[in-house]
Image (cartoon, rainbow, N blue to C red):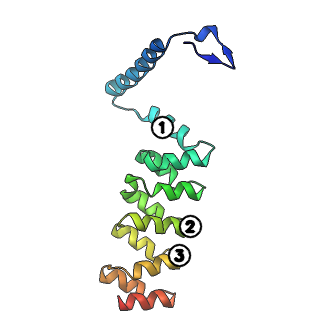
Amino acid sequence: RVLFRSGGIDPAFQCNAEDLLLSALHHVGDAIAFRRVNGDESPWIEQVTDLLTSHPDPFVRAQLAERCSLRQLRRLVTDEHVSVRLLSVTNPFAIDLDIQLVLAEDPDELVVHAFLDRHTPYRETVLKLIKCEHTSVRYRLASTNLANDLLSQLAHDHDSSVAKVARFT
């Protein structure tokens, strides 16, 4: 088995599969050893994060958003494509307060509703959602079992339908 380059065999890269695997494992071992010795993997992880979260194809970033690390998710929740942000709410790390606060300010109400469908927001997140621009989100909050002081804020909402629901909840 050999490695191909530009459609042909590159003699400089000829090797068998076992050598390639051993070489890859050696590099992984070096990275683990570096982490143990220096106690800091930040530069390496930052480089990997940059590469993955800046992929030009939004489909690739969307697939990453579902399973990525918290560090990667922090970048993907502000992605320009709504599909990436929508799938980021399915990530288990979306329970992180910082992530929730970013999602609460999303310009697309579908993302905010997808977040509320999957997660129970922290109080800090609810406070931000009460002030969000999306009437449907505030209406949804007003019809849920919130603390009285939070419902009181919604009862004074500038949208009469939100205020009415909050008063009768």
Residue positioned 58% across, 59% down in the render: 82
Determine if residue 104 is in view: no
**What's the residue type where badge 1 is placed?**
Glu
- In percent of width and height, residue 6 lies at 69, 20
Q: Which residue is mark 1?
A: 46
- In percent of width and height, residue 134 lies at 53, 75
**What's the residue type where badge 2 is placed?**
Asp
Q: Which residue is mark 3?
A: 134
Query: Measured along the vertical axis of the image, is residue 64 above or below residue 36?
Result: below
Residue positioned 46% across, 65% down in the render: 114
Cα separation between marks 1 and 2:
28 Å
- In percent of width and height, residue 115 lies at 44, 64
Q: Of helix, strand and loop, which one carries label 3?
A: loop
Determine if residue 93 is in view: yes
Q: Which mark is residue 130?
A: none
Q: Quadrant of the N terminus?
A: top right
- In percent of width and height, residue 131 lies at 47, 76
Point out the tag, 3 or 2, that comes first from the N-terminus: 2
Query: Which residue is more in the foreground, 106 or 9?
Result: 9
Pick out the residue farthest to the top: 11
Camera-near label (1 vs 2) is 2
Residue positioned 65% across, 18% down in the render: 5
Q: Which residue is mark 2?
A: 108
Point out the tag, 3 or 1, that comes first from the N-terminus: 1
Query: Which residue is more in the foreground, 44 or 91?
Result: 91
